[in-house]
Image (tube, rainbow, N blue to C red):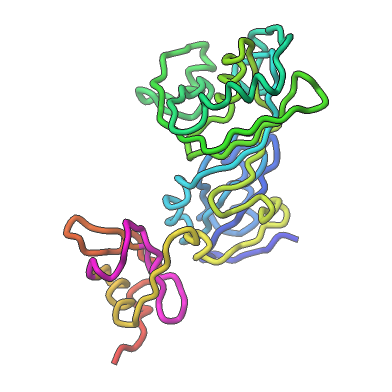
Amino acid sequence: MARRATPGIDGLCVVDKPAGWTSHDVVAKARGILGTRKVGHSGTLDPDATGVLLLGVGRGTRLLRYLVGLPKSYVGELVLGVETSTLDASGEVVAVHPTDGIDVAALRAAVPAFVGDIEQVPPMVSAIRIDGRRLHELAREGIEIDRPARPVTVTRYDVAATADPTVFRIEVDCSSGTYVRSLAADLGRAVGSGAHLRALRRTAVGPHLVADARPLDALDLLPLDACVRHLERLDCTEEETVRLRHGGRLAAERVAGDGPWAAFGPAGTLVAILERRADRLVGPSVVLEAAGNDPQVG
């Protein structure tokens, strides 16, 4: 049974998004289940795709910015020889190509061109805005425009054969903003054919794995600090905690590295997210506990 919550709840839900739902649909459903309007997601997942979708709840919505850029992992199927208008199975077939002689070895030989720091042209059917218009809105009007390539990083692109000689299983680890649809279509073109993607499943967003995801009818609200478990932790004294709750700053030598840092008070609760400032001091970009919650400092 889904956990029924009351207004004011905070935390993170790791959802296993079902096929046929938009990310907005999932947010709307979660708002009803959890009993709060303060729900948002950390990154759109295509309607036909399934898998990990992160929802910030309550004060967790203020931490979504630290989840958006996390690396992603996917599995899916590359269908060789058929190109579609959307680069995936939801679109109309726009071209069919012969696939004779193209096997898994040929695909693997072409993969290195799509691994590492690469430039990727986003598909027309996407939510990117150009000159104030979303590309998918233009696509629905039959308009196609030149799209500037964007830098993305692909750290793994594995291809495996299946029982169908025109269908291949792919596994991809990549940076946020990478279109796996484009990776599939581009690989098809690289071997002299065409391809589209189907059965896409997001298996991880940063440290959040699909094995930990829950369906919408069994949502589990994780604590607020689950939103920032990938950030370096800074345990603060009571005096530092009071200062941060008032928006104060800490000395630069209090932390190492580039940040950001998740600052915790003596009671083990998440107090603030810290970032370096221009003056080299370290200050809160988000304060999670109000100044009225100050502990007594002698």
Towards the viewer: 237 or 258: 258
Q: How many marks?
A: 0
When asked about the image quadrant of residue 92, the answer is top right
Residue 49, above or below 273: above
Residue pictured at 61% horizontal, 24% vertical: 184
The quadrant the N terminus occupies is bottom right
Residue pictured at 71% horizontal, 7% vertical: 98
Towards the viewer: 114 or 32: 114
Residue 37, above or below 181: below
The quadrant the C terminus occupies is bottom left
Q: Position of residue 11 (x, y in %)?
A: 53, 62
Left or right of 191 in this view: 134: left
Residue 48 seen: no
257 magenta-colored: yes
When asked about the image quadrant of residue 263, the answer is bottom left
Residue 112, above or below 219: above
Residue 248, above or below 113: below
Residue pictured at 68% horizontal, 7% vertical: 97
Residue 96 seen: yes
Residue pictured at 35% horizontal, 61% vertical: 286
175 magenta-colored: no
Q: Which residues are magenta?
A: 251-273
Left or right of 123 in this view: 232: left
Q: Position of residue 144 (x, y in %)?
A: 47, 12
Q: Position of residue 265 (x, y in %)?
A: 40, 77
